[in-house]
Amino acid sequence: MATRGAKSFFAAAAACALLGFHAECLAEEELAPGYGACIGRASGSSAGMLQCGSEAFAYWDKKLNASYKKAMDRCPDESCRKNLKDAERAFVKYKEGMQDMVLRQDSGFDVRLESQLFGIEATRRQARLLEYIAAYGE
């Protein structure tokens, strides 16, 4: 008899097949290069796991800042630069506000980890979006 996890896997596989996606649609992307190995070395240590998250955030934050600079350089005029700057400020405000809201829910490790993971994932998405803008923008 299939376990609940196996049923979920097969449901996801069936959905991928029906929608014509490749096998990689089932692969879960690592949060940042080396994050999985770092978590393995942390061996469940709260401090170790948070350190791994800090390293993952630093990776994406560096990429975000580089992509932001490239996107700014690509802007043809001051209006474009102002729009990008305003959008980036709004992103930072949103990300930090959501992290604060998560932290308000409790004071335990799970809440700190969830807030950190949200910040990393949001920063990763923003870095990638800025990479796209830098490559294909105005």
Image: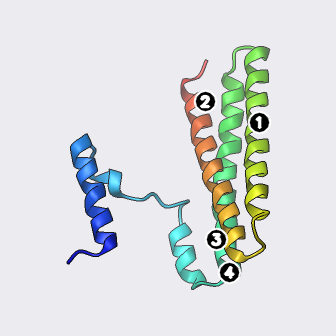
Q: Which residue is mark 2?
A: 134
Could you say whether the residue bearing mark 1 is in a helix, strand or loop? helix
Q: Quadrant of residue 92?
A: top right
Which quadrant would the C terminus be assigned to in this image? Answer: top right
Residue in front for this viewpoint, 126 or 96: 96
Mark 3–mark 2 distance (CA, rounded to whole Å): 28 Å
Q: Earlier in the sequence, mark 4 or mark 3?
A: 4
Position of residue 9 measured from the top left corner of the image (x, y, whole percent) = 30, 63
Marks 3 and 1: which is nearer the front? 1
Q: Is residue 90 above or below residue 98?
A: above
Q: Are marks 2 and 1 in contact (CB under 8 Å)?
A: no
- Residue type, label 2: Ala
Q: CA distance from mark 3 to mark 1?
A: 27 Å
SS label for mark 2: helix
User: Which numbered disc covers residue 52?
Assistant: 3
To which residue does mark 1 refer?
90
Q: Secondary structure at mark 4?
A: helix
Given the image, on which type of amino acid does mark 1 rest? Ala
